Amino acid sequence: MLKFILSRLWYGVLVMLGVIVIVFVLFQILPGDASRMLIGQRTDISTTEAIKKELGIDQPKFKQLISYINDMMPVSIHNSVDKENFFYLDEAKYANYLSILSFKKHKVILKAPYLKRSFQTQRPVNEMISQAFPKTFILAVVAMSFALIIGILLGIISAIFKNTFIDRTTLVGSVFGMALPSFFFAILLAWVFAYLLGNFTHLNMTGSLYTIDDFGNGQILTAKNLILPAFALGIRPLAVITELTRASLLDVFSMDYIKTAKAKGLSNQRVIFKHALKNSLNPVISSSTGWFASMLAGSVFVEYVFDWKGMGTLIVDALDKYDMPVLMGCIVFISLILIILNIFADILYAIIDPKVKLNE
């Protein structure tokens, strides 16, 4: 088991390194001068050159790539003496770090990845992501929990009442849910339940998890703002999980050990929940981890519709303002989350399914 986990972690490190390189190369291709974005179009040459030197973009591209990888890695090597050196250990950049090893003019340090500073706000990208991501994470957890609970329940009911009106209605609803674009469904939900029926539902068309109190009491937790975006985000995975649960249960129902359990006189409830359901959840778990990861990465439109101040809103604002460090930081961070979730899914799948070879 340990060998299996270490191999998955090693693959994750390699994939993450590839993502960092690809992100750096892609953003080098995009048009635009970072120094002009930072200080505006009207400036003199000396100021522009000073800004380029401060950002490190006056160096050769390969050297910039090595520096970018060095900033991204939790363990990095820096020059600790020469302030003019491109890899100088800047205390302002790495406010909290742990020195692991020192040799001659260099230090090996343990730190949080450094994602640079926003061109527009001059705030550290790490700080901006740390404020936005928890809201996206909460939204994704609630949406995924809703999709799992309702989807598995509907899948069980549909499998039990196969080829009946209930089953056909559930399948039609699942197809409709999979075909419905999230952004359109989000607009529809906001219009119906917050605008047309707002006097009855008391739901807001827009709003984040916390709102500013009008009486100067700071921020107030507004949990009701979570209902509509979570429902809009969870409708598609709910449809997929319903069909997966139904199909998997029907396959398990046809197996000999289920027929044997029924022949022994076990109740349908015991057969389903103790024997059949456990062995039919593997595809559901595999799909759920993928959907959860996509929610963290792809909730941009839903967050934008409901003005949910999470990663989606941060990405849209960065695109609108051409704020490259924020965009690069968001992509790298989301990629890291996807890799971690995929590793977790592989380990969980190996634990649940004994047919998976742990030494692979």
Image (tube, rainbow, N blue to C red):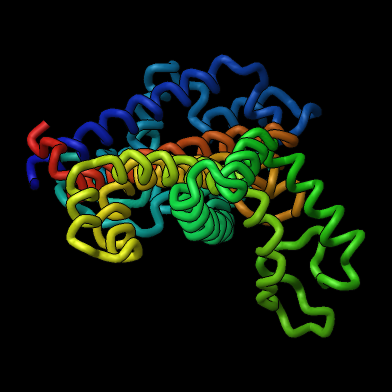
Q: Is residue 351 left or right of residue 97?
A: left
- Between 26 and 247, the one lying in front of the other is 247
Residue at (71% x, 66% y) in the render: 225
- Between 35 and 148, the one lying in front of the other is 148
Which percent across, then down, holds residue 187?
80, 46
Q: Is residue 64 left or right of residue 352?
A: right
Determine which quarter of the picture holds residue 42: top right
Q: Is residue 204 left or right of residue 127?
A: right
- Between 102 and 287, the one lying in front of the other is 287
Residue at (38% x, 45% y) in the render: 284
Can residue 107 be seen here?
no
Residue at (22% x, 63% y) in the render: 265
Q: Is residue 249 left or right of residue 214?
A: left
Labels in figure, total:
0
Which percent across, then down, holds residue 94?
39, 52
Residue at (67% x, 38% y) in the render: 176
> Is residue 209 placed above or below 188 in the rendered structure?
below
Can residue 251 be seen here?
yes
Determine which quarter of the picture holds residue 267: bottom left
Determine which quarter of the picture holds residue 75: top left
Which percent across, then down, holds residue 196?
92, 60
> Is residue 296 placed above or below 268 in the rendered structure?
above
Query: Looking at the rendering, in which quadrant would you find the C terminus?
Result: top left
